[in-house]
Structures are given as C-alpha cells and as structure tokens.
Image (tube, rainbow, N blue to C red):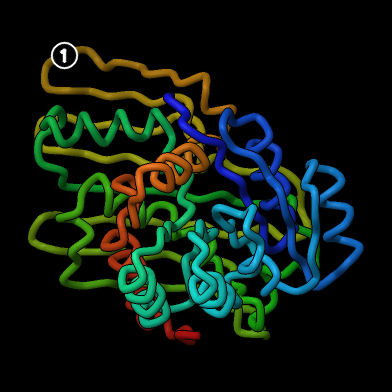
Amino acid sequence: MSISREIRWGILGPGLIAGLFAADLARTPGARCVAVASRDAERARAFAARFGASRHYTDYEALTHDPDVDIVYVATPHSHHFEHVKRMLAGGKPVLVEKPFTMTAVEAEELIARARDRRIFLMDALWTLCNPLMRDLIRRIREGQIGVPRAFSATIGPLGGIPLGHRVEDPALGGSFMLECLVYPLYILAAMAPELARADQIFAASVVTPRGVDTYAALSLSSSAGLANMSGGYAIGTQGLGLSTFHLIGDRGWLQIDDNVFNPGRATVSAGAKAPVVLNEPLNAQGYRWEIEEASRCIRAGEVESPLVPHELTLGVMRLLDRGRAAAGLRAS
C-alpha cells in the first residue's frame, strides 16, 4: 500500500471493541491513534495511556476541534451513534462508525445526507467486507463463477462470553441480537447477492426478554430471485462461541465460509464441474487493519464514501433491519 501521509485517528467511546480496534490501529502502517474521548475521565486516560494517544477528553465536542484528528472512530453503544456521528460531522470530522450504523434507516438517511452535503467521509465499520478473503469471494461471484445466486443461509453463534447485565441486555443501549449480529449476514448478502436482498417478503421471529430485547432472532427473505435465511442468538452468562458461518448457492456452483463469518480466513468455492477449491487468508488475523486501511485510503483520496461499504449498501441493510424488526414485532427504536 502506498502511503502519502499518516492518518491520525480519534476514538470516541473506549469500550471493548474500541480496544481491539486500537490494537490493530497500532499495527497498521500510516495510521496512529492520537486522541480518545469518554464521559469517564479515568477510562479515557487509561485508554490513551494503553494505546499511546497523546491526549484524552471528557468532552466529545473537543474531538471536533482537535486539529490533529483526521478521522473519528465512533464506538459508543449504537443507541448513541446518531447523536455522536451527527456531532462529529457538524465539526467537519470524517467518521468511521461501528455497526450497526444507527438504530433505524431514517437516522442513517439523515447522517448520510449530511455527510454528502458537506462532502465529508462517512463509512459503516463493516470489517467483514474489507477482509481480503471476503473481497475475493465477492469478486468471484461478480465474475459469475457460481452462476446466479439463488439461496443463502447463515448461522450466528451461539455467542457466549457475555456476562449477565451486559449492555446487549439493555434496551436503552440498543440491545438487540438482530441489530448487533444479524447485521453481518445481511451485509454479506447485500454485497454478494444484491438481488436476494431486494426481498419482496420478509418473515422474522425472535425470543424477547422481559425487558424487550431480542436475544435470539431469525430472518427469512424471499423474492423471485431466490431466498435467504439467517438466525442465531446469545448464550449470555456462558463461555465459548459456536460456529458462525454462511453458504451461498448459485445455479452453477456454491461457496461457504469454513471458519468465522465475522472475519473469515478459510472458505470453499465450488464452480461448475471443477473440484471445490479451498481458499486461505492467513492475514485475517490482522482483523480491523483492513477497514482502517480502507478508511485511510479514502481520506487521502478525498472520497466521501468507500466502494467496499458504500452508502447505498448501508441504507439498504438498515431498511432490511427495520423491516425485519417490524416483522418480529420489535420496537423500531
């Protein structure tokens, strides 16, 4: 990768995912964390010290006024994404926002319109679509190697390792398995087989806690092009992760992820009469690096959106999530 200048990052919301992101940021050439913001001064200070940021703030507005911050990674709970991204855009800062992008499609539409109007870069942080193996699979599908996609299926989890009382159980913080996890197969579907994502009908079901949070959910999309099914759930209070994967079947072949749908390193492709091919991507261990590099590339190039995770893709997925949650009888916000 040709690097013309270092991209300096600010991080808003020093939580678990932000820590993983910052660790990969430190390993990414041409990128550096320079600032962090949190309402909790001690958390901000500790995070800045851990990842070598030169300053920390308790006022989010300070990030927008920091001349050394080229882009802000928003990693607060998604219930707050709309407010926080809007504030960063108002201050003229490019933004990479952790998924799900917002709570509703209406919120996503407003943020994207603001970014486009002001010519400010804005990207949904779908590391999965920036992963080299996933990009290779999308290329193969577009080349017609498996023919016309007709059927998609994905399973997520069970996802353990989540303690009781975690934010995923809190409706005020956007707790929702559909929003938090089924967003991944929806993005993969929309990127790989957009005709299947143009669903004429959506069926959904969920198991809802007394607090109104769906901790298990299933979606089924149907159209004249074919069908797609996805499901899964949390195993809160337990340890370990189940296998999260997907299959895409075309009329002349098929492909599947063999290890980890979120950040794949191994896949199988069967094209026509040829023997199936196993693909390996050992660099997937670098995780968030690929979305960091893509966002940095866009900033250097003066682009307002990424071709890997374009705005229309984000809007399409958010609209599917709205429809899916409505079909399952869940609150829209």
Pointer 1 residue: 274
Left or right, 63 with reference to 101: right
Going by the picture, which residue comes out furthest to the front? 67
Determine the residue positioned at 51% across, 35% down. Answer: 5
Q: Quadrant of residue 138?
A: top left
Determine the residue positioned at 25% across, 64% down. Answer: 221
Left or right, 130 with reference to 76: left
- x then y, percent, for residue 223: 14, 63
Going by the picture, which residue comes out furthest to the right? 42
* Residue 8 appearing in the image: yes
Residue toward you, 53 or 152: 53
Residue toward you, 301 or 252: 301
Label 1 residue SS: loop
Q: Quadrant of the N terminus?
A: top left
Position of 275 relative to 89 (above/below): above
Determine the residue positioned at 19% across, 56% down. Answer: 196
Determine the residue positioned at 40% across, 33% down. Answer: 257
Tag 1: Cα neighbours inside 10 Å, few (<14), some, or many (≥20)? few
- x then y, percent, for residue 303: 33, 51
* Residue 321 appearing in the image: no
**Number of callouts:** 1
Position of 64 relative to 195 (above/below): below
Left or right, 106 with reference to 69: left
Q: Amino acid at mark 1?
A: Lys
Residue toward you, 61 or 190: 61
- x then y, percent, for residue 88: 55, 70
- x then y, percent, for residue 279: 37, 18
Position of 40 relative to 3 (above/below): below
